């Protein structure tokens, strides 16, 4: 369990609460402190707002937060929240008494308010950490975004990585297909742009580590039922990776077949091979079919992810037969890629967010105490009887005879 405390909260004497070294050294804390100090003159003391969470006392605003009908009512205080975040300041600039927040899960919004009201924010489960990360990003809270990213990195496995990628594709600035809201270029002249870019940095780092976890646990990720719920863009992020360490390309082909079937059901289409291929598009070419052989190749081609003529070309190349039709440059390049083994090295090193993603390097010996490793002996495959008969004199005699032969040859 991870408990996050707002580092900007101070006690009655104006002294900061203790915080970890990593929290104090991050620029996210400085940005957060900047936003808190912008209107600190409007706050009489910390005691004015540290005990106001879930309190109707002096409440002048009401939030109705939640999605898909799972909503809650939370009392708020304009003077407190407007000084914490530029998003809250813009949201509370209206005179409405009730504000609807229907784009954030109620758990994440609750944890966000707890953070801003100087209450401990508890990130116990994956769901809470995910929703809190989304809320912290939307309301430009870099320190809470960092803590959520670190907590999720601790819990990363194949299942959590799939959930994280589904959430982060709309939050990351560098992830393919991602879109930030509001756009970063629109905020270049605003302090909020720096805060937003800092939040996106933590999301990018978490997404990077999640993709590496999927690479290392490709079979578990591709066989998980949550893969079928991914959007086309999320699925493309995974199956297009060359560094997927699948035990067999058949695992990837079967995963694509299951996803295409689920996609046809969602769009109310008939489960025909043509509709499935249309749902997959270019993703049907991601499995490296020519790395398969025998029964596995037959099973992969029986899924009908490829067109009939493409399946015929694969079979002809696998069995070293002449192609049924002339092969163009594009088809030849595709066949070569399908026969090329996947790299064994990881795509990149993970970003250090938690002990799980820490790279432990073996200590190198110093010059004073370091010793050269012993050279391994080369294995000898000579019969044991012959080795016992050899001696120094016989070796010298054979060497002398060999020298004479070379001299008079």
Image: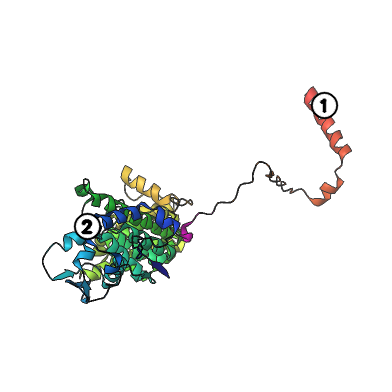
Which mark is on residue 347?
none
| Label 1 CA crowd tier, 10 Å (few <14, some 14–19, many 20+) | few
Give the quadrant of residue 46. bottom left
Residue 283 or 141: which is nearer the viewer? Answer: 141
In the depicted structure, whether residue 275 falls above or below residue 339 = below
| Left or right relative to 157: residue 91 | left
The image shows residue 201 at horizontal and vertical percentages of 33, 53
Q: Secondary structure at mark 2?
A: helix
User: Residue at label 2?
Assistant: 86
Residue 339 or 227: which is nearer the viewer? Answer: 227
* Mark toward the start of the polypeptide (2 vs 1): 2
Give the quadrant of residue 114. bottom left
Which mark is on residue 404?
1
- The part of the chain drawn in magenta is 354-360
Residue 79 or 245: which is nearer the viewer? Answer: 79
Pick the quarter of the image with the N terminus: bottom left
Residue 87 visible in the shown view: yes
In the depicted structure, whether residue 399 falls above or below residue 106 = above
The image shows residue 255 at horizontal and vertical percentages of 36, 65
The image shows residue 289 at horizontal and vertical percentages of 40, 56
Residue 67 visible in the shown view: no
Q: Find the distance from the CA under tag 2 to the CA under tag 1.
A: 94 Å
């Amino acid at each position: 369990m991870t408990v996050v405390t707002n580092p900007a909260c101070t006690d009655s004497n104006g002294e900061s609460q203790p915080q970890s070294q990593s929290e104090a050294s991050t620029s996210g804390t400085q940005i957060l402190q900047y936003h808190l100090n912008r209107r600190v003159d409007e706050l009489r003391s910390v005691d004015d707002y540290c005990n106001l969470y879930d309190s109707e006392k002096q409440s002048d605003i009401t939030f109705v937060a939640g999605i898909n009908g799972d909503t809650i009512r939370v009392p708020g205080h304009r003077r407190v929240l407007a000084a914490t975040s530029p998003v809250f300041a813009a949201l509370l600039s209206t005179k409405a008494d009730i504000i609807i927040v229907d784009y954030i899960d109620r758990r994440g919004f609750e944890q966000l308010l707890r953070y801003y009201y100087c209450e401990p924010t508890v990130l116990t489960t994956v769901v809470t950490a995910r929703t809190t990360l989304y809320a912290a990003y939307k309301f430009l809270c870099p320190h809470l975004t960092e803590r959520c990213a670190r907590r999720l990195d601790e819990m990363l496995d194949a299942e959590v990585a799939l959930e994280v990628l589904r959430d982060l594709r709309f939050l990351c600035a560098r992830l393919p297909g991602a879109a930030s809201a509001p756009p970063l270029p629109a905020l270049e002249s605003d302090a909020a742009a720096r805060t937003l870019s800092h939040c996106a940095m933590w999301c990018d780092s978490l997404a990077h580590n999640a993709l590496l976890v999927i690479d290392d646990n490709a079979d578990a990720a591709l066989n998980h039922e949550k893969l079928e719920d991914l959007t086309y863009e999320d699925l493309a992020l995974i199956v297009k990776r060359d560094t997927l360490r699948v035990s067999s390309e058949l695992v990837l082909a079967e995963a694509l077949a299951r996803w295409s079937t689920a996609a046809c059901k969602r769009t109310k289409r008939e489960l025909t091979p043509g509709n499935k291929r249309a749902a997959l598009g270019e993703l049907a070419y991601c499995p490296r079919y020519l790395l398969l052989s025998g029964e596995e190749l037959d099973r992969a081609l029986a899924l009908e992810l490829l067109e009939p003529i493409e399946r015929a070309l694969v079979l002809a190349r696998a069995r070293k037969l002449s192609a049924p039709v002339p092969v163009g440059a594009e088809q030849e390049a595709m066949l070569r890629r399908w026969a090329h083994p996947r790299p064994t090295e990881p795509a990149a090193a993970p970003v250090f967010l938690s002990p799980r993603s820490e790279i432990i390097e073996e200590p190198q010996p110093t010059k004073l105490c370091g010793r050269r490793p012993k050279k391994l002996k080369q294995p000898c495959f000579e019969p044991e009887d012959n080795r016992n008969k050899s001696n120094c004199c016989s070796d010298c005699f054979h060497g002398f005879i060999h020298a004479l032969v070379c001299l008079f040859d």
